[in-house]
């Protein structure tokens, strides 16, 4: 089924969409700190080829240090972060587009005073 996720507001520097649950993404279920995620397109929308998620990381926070077989497409919406890709670090900010290849070690660490937010597209079957 086709769906439109309506943007509603910004809360604590994080974007929000109508009827999209903010999910835990932190010490309880990953190694992330001060981060949230929302699944904008996923299983609930019966998306069989890709999923799109929005991640927000508060200043001083970070995403999990991850390595997966699947690749990622990332579009930075707001804020700044240091991105670890393998053994290298890169500064990224709003407007940057990142391709993370399969099995590449990666992690975002919010580096500015503002919340860091990005869209992440991954295969539906991971």
Image (cartoon, rainbow, N blue to C red):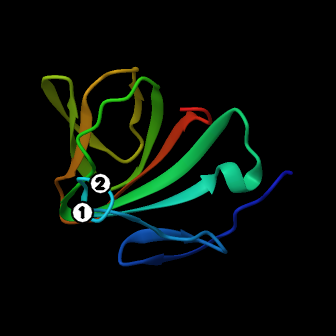
Which residue matches tag 1? 27
Quadrant assignment, res 39? bottom right
Q: Is residue 119 left or right of residue 8?
A: left
Label 1 residue SS: loop
Q: Which residue is mark 2?
A: 30
Q: Are marks 2 and 1 in contact (CB under 8 Å)?
A: yes
Instruction: Give above or below for 102 relative to 1.
Output: above
Q: Residue furthest right?
A: 1
Of residue 25 and residue 89, the one placed in the foreground of this image is: 25
Where's residue 40, x and y in %?
A: 61, 56
Q: 10 Å neighbourhood of mark 1: few (<14), some, or many (≥20)?
A: few
Task: Estimate the x, y position of residue 80 in percent, counting from the top left.
Answer: 26, 51
Picture residue at 42% right of the left edge, 23% below the top: 69
Identify which residue, 69 or 104, lies in the foreground. Answer: 69
What is the C-alpha distance between the residues marked 2 and 1? 5 Å
Where residue 102 sits in the image (x, y, percent)? 40, 20
Residue at 52%, 51% in the rendered image: 53
Q: Is residue 9 left or right of residue 5?
A: left
Quadrant of res 8:
bottom right
Crowding near the residue tagged with mark 2, few <14, some 14–19, many ≥20 C-alpha atoms within 10 Å: few
């Amino acid at each position: 089924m086709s769906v439109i996720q309506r943007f509603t507001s910004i809360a604590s520097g994080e974007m929000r969409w109508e009827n999209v649950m903010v999910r835990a993404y932190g010490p309880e279920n990953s190694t992330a700190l001060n981060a949230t995620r929302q699944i904008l397109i996923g299983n609930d929308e019966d998306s069989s080829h890709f999923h799109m998620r929005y991640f927000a990381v508060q200043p001083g926070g970070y995403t999990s240090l991850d390595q997966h077989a699947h690749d990622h497409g990332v579009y930075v919406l707001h804020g700044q972060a240091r991105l670890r890709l393998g053994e290298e670090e890169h500064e990224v900010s709003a407007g940057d587009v990142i391709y993370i290849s399969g099995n590449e070690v990666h992690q975002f660490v919010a580096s500015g005073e503002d919340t860091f937010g990005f869209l992440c597209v991954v295969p539906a079957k991971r």
